[in-house]
Amino acid sequence: MAVSEVLLALAGNWQGSNRLWLVPTEPARESEGTAVLQPVAQNKFITLHYTWADEGQPQAGVLLLGQDG
């Protein structure tokens, strides 16, 4: 079964601001980030590749999203 049309409609390149709270009593760490959503495997899954920085150090991650009917 394919991922939902809602997720497919979000496919593309995104940019935004991030806030990361590691300790509730300390200020948030802020950075710019990017995300790329891309359908894969005949639209059965969508990948989310994302980047940000934490204390000036580049970070990256990836998610694989699917839907079980």
Image: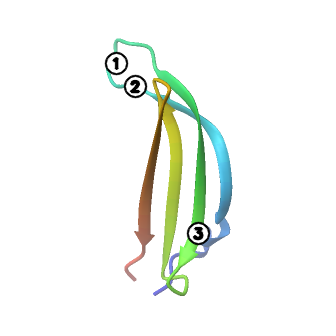
Confirm or deny contact between disc 1 and disc 2 (CB under 8 A).
yes
Q: Is residue 60 left or right of residue 10?
A: left
Residue at the disc numbered 3: 38
Residue at the disc numbered 2: 21
> Whole-percent x and y of residue 21?
40, 25
Quadrant that contains the N terminus: bottom left
* Other-residue count near label 2 (Cα within 10 Å), few / some / many at <14 / 14–19 / ≥20: few
Residue at the disc numbered 1: 24
Name which residue lies at 34% across and 25% down: 22
Q: Which picture quadrant has residue 6? A: bottom right
Mark 2 residue element = loop
* Other-residue count near label 1 (Cα within 10 Å), few / some / many at <14 / 14–19 / ≥20: few
Name which residue lies at 66% across and 45% down: 15
Q: Given the image, on which type of amino acid does mark 1 rest?
A: Pro
Q: Is residue 4 above or below residue 37?
A: below
Q: Is residue 15 above or below residue 56?
A: below
In three-dimensional space, the C-alpha distance between marks 1 and 2, rounded to whole angstroms, equals 6 Å
Name which residue lies at 47% across and 22% down: 29
